[in-house]
Image: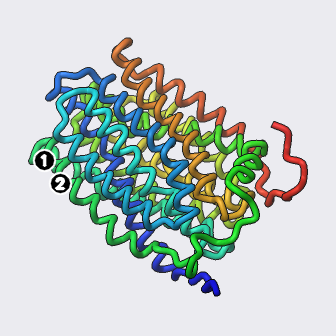
Amino acid sequence: MQAAERKLSMAQVLICGAMIVTLSMGIRHGFGLWLLPVTQAQNWDRGTFSFALAIQNLAWGCIGIFAGMMADRFGAFRVLVAGALLFSLGLVGMALTTTPLTFTLTAGVLIGAAQAGTTYAVVYGVIGRQIDPARRSWAMGVAAAAGSFGQFLMVPVEGYLIRNFGWQQALLSLSLVALLILPLAFGLREHFGTGAAAPKRDQTIVEALGEAFKYRSFQLLMAGYFVCGFQVVFIGVHMPSYLKDKGLSPDVASYALGLIGLFNVFGTYIAGSLGQRLAKRKILAFIYLGRALAISLFLWAPLSPLSVYIFAAVMGTLWLSTVPVTNAAIAQIFGVAHLSMLSGFVFFSHQIGSFLGVWLGGVLYDRTGSYDVVWYIAIALGVFAAIVNLPVRETPIERGAMPQPA
């Protein structure tokens, strides 16, 4: 006789999930600090570094789909373990590589795969299955806030390691930090009962995908998330170099990225909490429009350390606040049986945007000597994302009914 599924405690899920996201997102958030040290040491242009990180984001999105499927089917534990090992291996390879190809394979493919197995889609799948719907959006906000705290905590540490020990030793040190995800993964080891790999589902994977991709609101959420990826990864990777080009100290960039992480703690928590009470589509529209306005004012105002810190605080509040709201909307519309997989597909759209944001930042800088064009694209996309999120329908889908026309 099959044993009943045993739930994990909410405290256990939130603490372990939050710590995993803190480590994974915290390490990743500081990669922009390596752009100048690596390109100068290897005599590469910025496009080479940018392309590797663009591939990282694309690999993260592609592999994240399958990581989500595996987490839905077998639980998050195995996926998290594999992701932690790949993360450590990728950081070691990133430190020791000497050619653009191997740098792309390690910093790009390996770390992208590691991110797929250690971040939001996998952790949110556990939250969706283990935490009551009445508190789900709030819990996702807590996990996202933890990832933001990781950015605040890790970026200054990474800057310190680079300055005092060199960029290679800094990466080797972080490879050991990434292994801390392994013991935390045991806290998210779900118990589905003897002989059971996952809870009973009313749909197959193919049926769930067909339903989602024919549903207009799912398409609109994907479009908005594309913009999110473009904006945050362009800023996260290229802002340190942009500020140095303008004559500001590298410390200003480190503090700015740290402030983004700090204020993102509050922004994601608030967004997740509001998602329990307000229309998620309106929250998302406000976030994207706010980003467009913040970037416009940043470019218009005279550049100084103070203006950078104000911009970082505002953008930080809006930075990953889309994550709990978007994933909670998906869970609300489609249920949680295939949540990690569907979140993975939406996140793939995010990562296509990330690929274009980081890659175009490097390519257009090399061709024009300026980041201005990409800043303007980020503003226009913010307005676009605000518009497309407003028609999203958040009510649970009626199975067996005709889907909304695309």
Closer to the camera in the image, 252 or 280: 280
Describe the element under mark 2 as helix, strand or loop: helix
Q: Quadrant of the N terminus?
A: bottom right
Q: Quadrant of the C terminus?
A: top right
Q: Look at label 1 and name its amino acid.
A: Gln
Closer to the camera in the image, 22 or 78: 78
Which colour scheme appears in the figure? rainbow
Q: Residue at x 67, y 45 (%)?
A: 221
In which quadrant of the rendered view does residue 285 lie? Answer: top right
In which quadrant of the rendered view does residue 201 lie? Answer: bottom right
Residue position for label 2? 173
Q: CA distance from mark 2 to mark 1?
A: 6 Å
Mark 2, residues whose alpha carbon is within 10 Å: few (<14), some, or many (≥20)?
some
Residue position for label 1? 169
Q: Residue at x 46, y 40 (%)?
A: 232
Q: Position of residue 162 (x, y in %)?
A: 16, 44
The answer to whether residue 61 is seen in the rendering is yes
The vertical placement of 9 against 351, above or below, is below
Closer to the camera in the image, 195 or 142: 195
Q: Residue at x 65, y 38 (%)?
A: 223
Left or right of 319 on screen, residue 92: left
Q: Look at label 2 and name its amino acid.
A: Ser
Q: Position of residue 115 (x, y in %)?
A: 41, 50
The vertical placement of 263 against 238, above or below, is below
Left or right of 48 on screen, residue 205: right
Mark 1, residues whose alpha carbon is within 10 Å: few (<14), some, or many (≥20)?
some
